[in-house]
Amino acid sequence: MKRPPKPPARADRVSLLRYMALFRRDILSAQPARLYRAWMAEFRTPFFRSYLMNQPDLVSEVLRKRPEDFPKSDRIGEGLRPLLGDSVFLTNGATWERQRRIIDPAFEGGRLRDTFPAMWAAAEAATARLTRRAGDEVEIEAETSHAAADVIFRTLFSIPIEHEVAAQVFSEFRDYQRSQPILNLAAFVPLPKWMPRFFRRDTRAAAASIRKLITQLTAERMDAIGAGTAPDDLATKIMTTRDPETGETFSTGEMVDQVAIFFLAGHETSASALAWTLYLMALYPEWQERVAEEAKALQGPDFGVMSKLRISRDVFREALRLYPPVPMMVREAACPEHFRDRDVPKGSQIVLSPWHLHRHERLWDNPDGFDPGRYGTENGKTCLRAAYIPFSAGRRVCTGAGFAMVEGPLILSMLLRDLKVELTDRPAPVPVAHLTVRSDKGIWLRISRR
C-alpha cells in the first residue's frame, strides 16, 4: 500500500549531545516515535525544560485561551534575527500588538479579492515555465519556490520575479536557505541578551544582502507613496495604514523587517506546501485526475472561481496536514503551570508540534495516510477543529492563512489543468525540517502535457 514519506524516529533515549546533533541535522527524525501517541511529553536538559503538548485542550489553552501567558519563545528566533530583525514573527507584547494592528487590514477578506489577479498572473507564469519543460524530470521544489516568490513580489510590490531587484532577492534567499541551520546555540543554552550571537559568515552576508535589496524596494515605494504614484498593492496598504491607537505608520526600517517575514513566511512555507502537494498528486494519480477535471472551471482571473475548487482545497489541506511547513512552534511559560498532574516551572519551553498533532494516532483515523476525503467525515471535521494548526491558532494565527489557502489551490489547479506530474525512478523524498519541511534530496517529478 502506498504511503506518504515519513522520516524515521530516533531511539527513545539518547544523550543530550546526541540529541543536539540529531536536532541540528533534522528536528523531525530527532524525535522519538512515542510523540505520535503522547498527550504530553517532558524533556529535560541542564539548561531548561521543554514540554510537548498534543492534547487538544492543552493546545487550545496555550494558543487560544491564554496566549498572553505563553509568549513566543526567543529560542527558535535566535537563528533568524539576522534576516528578520524585529518582525511580527519574533516579537511579543505591545510591540507585536502594534505590528498586527497595522498589518492585519492588508490581509482582510476584501483585500484577497484585490490581490487575486496578481496571484493568477503568477500561476499562469508558473504553468508556462513548466510547460516548456514538458518531457523532463524536474526538481519541483525549485519550481514551487520560484512560483511562490513570484506571488509575493506581484502581490506585495506589483513586480514580477523577472524584475531585477526581485530576482536578486530570490537568488540571495536561496543562498540564505543553504547557509542557515535550524539550530542556533541559544536554542539550547539560554544566553543573556547582551552576549553577542555568532552566525556563519555566509548566513550574515546573505541576510545583509537581502535586507539591503528589500530596503531599496521599500524606500522606492515610500517615495512613490509621497508622490501619489504608488500602486494599490499590499506594500502600499501596509505602509499607509496608521496604528488606530497611536496614529503612527511603520518606519522604513520597521517595514523592511515585515517584508522580510512576508517573504520568508509567504514564500518559503507556500513553496514547501505546494511541492509536497504535487508529489502527493504523482503518488496518488486518481486524486490528480479529480483536481485536473475540477480545474477546467478556471477560465479567467475571477475570484469567484475559488468556491468551485473544493477538491483542490481539500487536497492542499491534506498536504498541509501531512507536511506542515512549520513543524514546531515554541512558546514560553510566563508563570508556573500545572498540566496533566505535572508541575511546569516558569520559563519552561512549551512546544506545539503540528507535525505530531496532525499525525496523532489517538486523534486521526489513518493518520499517516493521504485521504483528502477525510474532511467530509465526522472524525475529519472534529480533528480539523481541534487538531489542525498548520497556520498556528488563536491571536497569533498566521495573518496570511487566508492568502495561502487561495494561492495554494489556485496554482495547484492551474498546473494540473494543463500538465500531468508523475513519479520518477529516484528514491522517494524523505521529509526534513530546516527553515520549513523540505525533502532531503529534492522532489523529482516527470512533467508532461495533458
Image: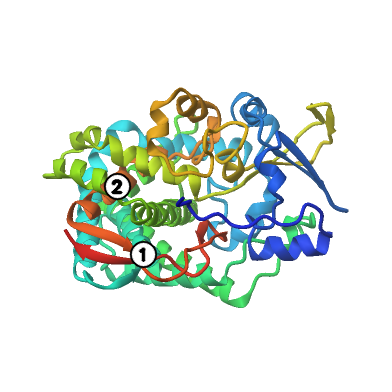
Dot placed on the residue nearer the N-terminal end, 1 or 2 = 1
Nearest to the observer: residue 200 or residue 10? 10
**Residue 126 as seen in the image, left or right of residue 173:** left
Q: Nearer the viewer, residue 425 or 275?
A: 425
State the mark number for residue 140.
Answer: 1
Image quarter of residue 13: bottom right
Task: Answer whether residue 157 is visible to the viewer in this image.
Answer: yes
Few, some or many residues within 10 Å of mark 1 (<14, 14–19, 20+): many
Q: Identify the residue position indicated by label 2 in the image.
A: 286
What residue is at 15 percent from the left and 44 percent from the top?
A: 296
Of the residues shown, which amino acid type is indicated by label 1?
Ile
Q: Secondary structure at mark 1?
A: helix
Q: How many C-alpha atoms fall within 10 Å of the one at disc 2: few (<14), some, or many (≥20)?
A: few
Near-viewer residue (259 or 379): 379
Picture quadrant where residue 301 is located = top left
Q: Position of residue 295 (x, y in %)?
A: 19, 44
